[in-house]
Each structure stands twice: as structure tokens, then as C-alpha cells.
């Protein structure tokens, strides 16, 4: 009787086959990441490979890469350059919390990041008495 091919992700992992490019990414990142909590993020990334498909994996991979860059002080991504430029103009109460939320959205969701930036810009306008709605 011939052995059946591995049919589930658990079977595949059990065989030790990590040849898929996604799993190779995970293995490389295990050696490079330094930020606090990266171990849990890598587990989530590996799980996403088997359960969420390509888009879920790519989104988590983006978040992990951006979290690592931020932990090392790298703010070269266009979103963060934009946010840093905006931060120089902010004076309203609570702007630091809003910036922190925008940074988190940059790591996980660019669409919501853009919404957060617009909200921050609007709050700043209102705080200086500008009630116009040019957007």
C-alpha cells in the first residue's frame, strides 16, 4: 500500500517541508527580526500561509516588515514621511495619540491610514478656528 500524499497543512508541516516561498520568508525573518513580540507575529504569519491565502499573508508580512523598520527608527516609507511632515504642524490636544494610531494603521491598512491622516488634518484645522471643508 502506497503512502498517501500529505493533504492538510498539519501533514505538510509534520513532514518538515518548508520549501514554499512563504515559509522561506518566515524562516528568514526568524533570524532577522528584533522587535518585541515578533515571535507571535511570525506564528500569525505562518498560520496565515495555511489559512488566509496570499493576501492575508502579504498583509501580515507588510505589518511585520514595517514594525521592524519602525523599531529601528526607519521612517523612510512615504506614509511615515507624510506623517512626520504633518506632525510638525500639529498643536491640538490629543494629536500624539492620533499620530500613534496612524502609525499603527500604516503598519496594517493603508486605506485606513489615509482616513486617519485626513482626520488629523481636519482636527488641526478646527483647533485653529478653520471651519471650512475643502475636502
Image: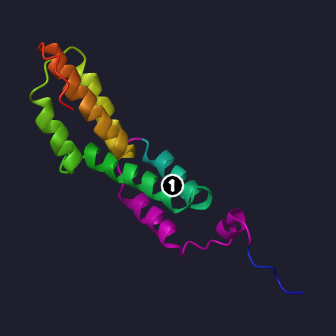
Q: Quadrant of the C terminus?
A: top left
The answer to whether 43 is drawn above or below residue 88 in the figure is below
Question: Would residue 29 be counted in the magenta stretch?
Answer: yes
Q: Residue at x 21, y 24 (%)?
A: 122
Picture mark count: 1
Q: Main secondary structure of the magenta part?
A: helix
Examine the structure image and report whether residue 113 is included in the region drawn in magenta: no
Residue 41 seen in this snapshot: yes
Q: How is the image coloured?
A: rainbow
Q: Is residue 57 above or below residue 85?
A: below
What stretch of residues is rendered in magenta? 7-36
Tell me: 121 left or right of 19: left
Q: Which residue is mark 1?
A: 56
Q: Where's residue 116, x and y in %?
A: 30, 32
The residue sitting at the right extreme is 1
Label 1 sits on a secondary structure element that is helix
| Residue 57, position as x, y percentages in the image | 49, 57
Q: Nearer the viewer, residue 106 or 1?
A: 106
Q: Residue at x 22, y 20 (%)?
A: 123
Q: Quadrant of the N terminus?
A: bottom right
Q: Position of residue 39 (x, y in %)?
A: 47, 48
Residue neighbourhood size for the residue with mark 1, other residues' Cα within 10 Å, grouped as few (<14), some (14–19), many (≥20) = some
Q: Quadrant of residue 134?
A: top left
* Residue at 28% in and 43% down: 71
Q: Toward the viewer: 64 or 57?
A: 57
Amino acid at each position: 500500500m502506497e503512502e498517501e500524499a500529505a493533504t492538510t497543512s498539519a501533514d505538510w508541516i509534520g513532514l518538515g517541508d518548508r520549501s514554499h516561498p512563504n515559509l522561506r520568508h518566515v524562516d528568514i525573518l526568524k533570524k532577522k527580526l528584533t522587535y518585541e513580540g515578533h515571535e507571535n507575529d511570525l506564528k500569525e504569519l505562518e498560520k496565515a500561509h495555511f489559512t488566509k491565502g496570499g493576501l492575508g499573508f502579504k498583509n501580515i508580512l507588510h505589518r511585520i516588515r514595517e514594525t521592524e523598520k519602525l523599531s529601528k527608527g526607519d521612517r523612510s516609507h512615504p506614509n511615515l514621511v507624510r506623517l512626520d511632515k504633518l506632525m510638525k504642524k500639529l498643536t491640538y490636544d490629543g494629536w500624539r495619540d492620533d499620530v500613534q494610531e496612524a502609525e499603527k494603521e500604516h503598519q496594517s491598512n493603508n486605506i485606513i491610514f489615509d482616513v486617519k491622516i485626513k482626520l488629523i488634518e481636519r482636527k488641526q484645522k478646527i483647533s485653529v478656528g478653520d471651519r471650512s471643508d475643502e475636502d
